Image (tube, rainbow, N blue to C red):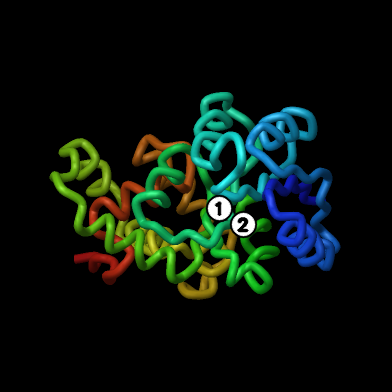
């Protein structure tokens, strides 16, 4: 059973999210809150698999909540659910530990899938959000660090292809379907990617990939 805490300052929105998640027999909402302080307290109390968190909260905003939980090394994955689709904000949230970002107008369809992905440590980005993040990454000033470039060069062609799909916001199930392989095979490749890049999370790998312009192009050939 995947446990979830929902924090949003609008009661109707919280009720709608809970109703959507309650339709999934493998997901249970264990607590709800309406402000950032609630998020910090409820995560500490319940240790949920996933925290579904709004950005605009009355006391502590979602970015600061994400940063604090990341610093505290919480086991809960943080799934941002908001109407905002600002690329720089998304980058900041991912860099500070958020696992996924779902737009509220897509929540009815995407939320259960996003929660499942987040519970497995997989990133989830709404398609329109993913495209903005890619554009932001491609147009960022400065050059990638040489060490990071060398790390990418250590990847096999298949690992590079999978990293490219991660940068597009696909989860392991979607990648497996795209490449016509098993999910276990994808998981093994993802673990190898983390090891070669010296990273611990999918969000870190995604950010590095986007900073190198992946996510909108084909993976390199094996030759």
- Could you tell me if the residues under marks 2 and 1 are in contact, i.e. CB atoms within 8 Å? yes
Answer left or right for 129 relative to 116.
left
Q: Position of residue 22 (x, y in %)?
A: 83, 62
Q: In the current view of this chain or complex, which residue is farthest to the front?
A: 58
Say which quadrant the C terminus sits in.
bottom left
| Residue density around tag 2, few if under 14, some if 14–19, many if 20 or more, within 10 Å | many
Q: Position of residue 24 (x, y in %)?
A: 81, 65
User: Of 46 and 6, which appears nearest the observer?
Assistant: 6
Answer left or right for 14 relative to 129.
right
Q: Position of residue 45 (x, y in %)?
A: 78, 29
Seen at 61% across and 52% down, the residue is 118
Secondary-structure class at tag 1: loop
User: Of 164 and 5, which appears nearest the observer?
Assistant: 5
Q: Position of residue 27 (x, y in %)?
A: 80, 56
- Which residue in the protein does label 2 denote? 117
Answer left or right for 99 relative to 155.
right
Q: In the current view of this chain or complex, which residue is farthest to the top?
A: 72
Say above or below: 81 vs 223: above
Disc on res. 180: none
User: Of 155 and 138, which appears nearest the observer?
Assistant: 138
- Which residue in the protein does label 1 denote? 122
Seen at 19% across and 57% down, the residue is 139
Figure quadrant of residue 43: top right
Counting residues from the start of the chain, the first of labels 2 and 1 encountered is 2
Spatial separation of the CA atoms under disc 2 and disc 1: 5 Å
| Residue density around tag 1, few if under 14, some if 14–19, many if 20 or more, within 10 Å | many
Seen at 32% across and 47% down, the residue is 208
Seen at 33% across and 64% down, the residue is 215
User: Of 138 and 144, which appears nearest the observer?
Assistant: 138
Secondary-structure class at tag 2: helix
Say above or below: 188 vs 196: below
């Amino acid at each position: 059973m995947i446990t979830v805490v929902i924090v949003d300052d609008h009661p109707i929105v919280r009720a709608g999210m809970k109703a959507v998640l309650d339709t999934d027999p493998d997901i249970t909402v264990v607590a709800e809150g309406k402000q950032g302080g609630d998020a910090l307290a409820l995560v500490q109390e319940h240790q949920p698999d996933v925290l579904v968190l709004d950005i605009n909260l009355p006391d502590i905003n979602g970015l600061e909540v994400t940063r604090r939980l990341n610093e505290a090394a919480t086991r809960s994955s943080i799934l941002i659910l908001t109407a905002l689709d600002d690329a720089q904000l998304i980058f900041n949230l991912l860099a500070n530990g958020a696992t996924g970002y779902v737009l509220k107008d897509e929540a009815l369809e995407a939320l259960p899938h996003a929660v499942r992905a987040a519970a497995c440590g997989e990133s989830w980005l709404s398609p329109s959000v993913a495209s903005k993040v890619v554009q932001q990454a491609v147009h960022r000033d400065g050059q990638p660090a040489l060490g990071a470039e060398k790390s990418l060069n250590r990847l096999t062609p298949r690992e590079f292809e999978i990293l490219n799909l991660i940068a597009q916001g696909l989860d392991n199930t979607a990648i497996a379907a795209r490449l016509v392989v098993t999910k276990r095979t994808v998981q093994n490749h993802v673990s190898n990617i983390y090891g070669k890049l010296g990273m611990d999370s999918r969000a870190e790998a995604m950010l590095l990939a986007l900073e190198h312009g992946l996510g909108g192009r084909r993976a390199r050939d094996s030759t």
